[in-house]
Image (tube, grey):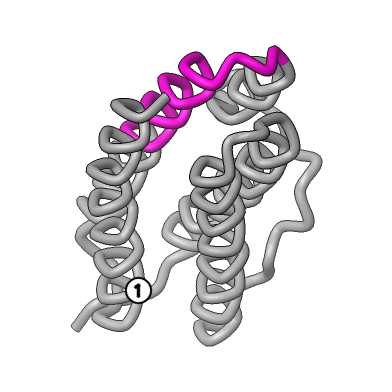
Amino acid sequence: MSTYTESVGNKLNDLLEKTYDAEKGFKKAAENTNNSALKSYFNGKAQQRYDFGHELKSEIKSFGQEVDKGGSFTGKAHRTWMDVKAMFSSDNEEAMLEEAIRGEKASIEEYNEVLNETSLPTSTSQVLNKQKVAIENGLSTINTLEDLS
């Protein structure tokens, strides 16, 4: 039977913080484009990450772990979306999409890293797999939007 360890809780808290970083990055991107298709896409992705965050928090709490309130920047916990938010302020739609692609690919890698944890409870694996698939599906949408810009 899988156990929910403090290590798993820490990994999920890292993923949670990155999820909120992504939400902020997508909101910033939506603010910095006049293209209605891009604005809609970025707003939708921000809402998706908001929802992901609440799912992750519920999962962490359901196993009696503390939800990290943030503020724990370490050298190891590189915040991909911090770079994205800075790039989004440039008002360059192509650059925003390229950064969104890079950020989404990094998110998928982070999900894969946590999913490779052997002690994940079934419910945690299901939540993470569902979120990862949604991010993967979103990559094809980004590629379509990139062709329009």
Judging depth in this view, the residue of 54 and 66 nearest the camera is 54
Which portion, as a residue range, is magenta?
A: 90-105
Q: Position of residue 100 (x, y in %)?
A: 46, 31
Q: Position of residue 34 (x, y in %)?
A: 67, 34
Q: Position of residue 141 (x, y in %)?
A: 30, 45
> Helix, strand or loop at disc 1?
helix
Q: Position of residue 16 (x, y in %)?
A: 57, 55
Q: Is residue 69 left or right of residue 102?
A: right
Q: Disc count in the image?
A: 1
User: Does the magenta-highlighted stretch encompass residue 102?
Assistant: yes
Looking at the rendering, in which quadrant would you find the N terminus? bottom left
User: Does the magenta-highlighted stretch encompass residue 79?
Assistant: no
The three-letter amino acid code for the residue at tag 1 is Val
Q: Is residue 137 left or right of residue 5?
A: left
Judging depth in this view, the residue of 94 and 120 nearest the camera is 94
Judging depth in this view, the residue of 141 and 10 nearest the camera is 141
**Magenta region's main secondary structure?**
helix
Q: In terms of image quadrants, where is residue 65?
A: bottom right
| Residue topped by disc 1 | 127
Q: Classify mark 1: residues with Cα within 10 Å, few (<14), some (14-19) or many (20+).
A: some
Give the residue displayed 59% in from the left and 63% down from the top: 47
Looking at the rendering, in which quadrant would you find the C terminus? top left
Q: In terms of image quadrants, where is residue 124?
A: bottom left
- Vertically, is 67 above or below 17? below
Give the residue displayed 51% in from the left and 53% down from the top: 45
Give the residue displayed 25% in from the left and 46% down from the top: 112
Give the residue displayed 53% in from the left and 26% down from the top: 80
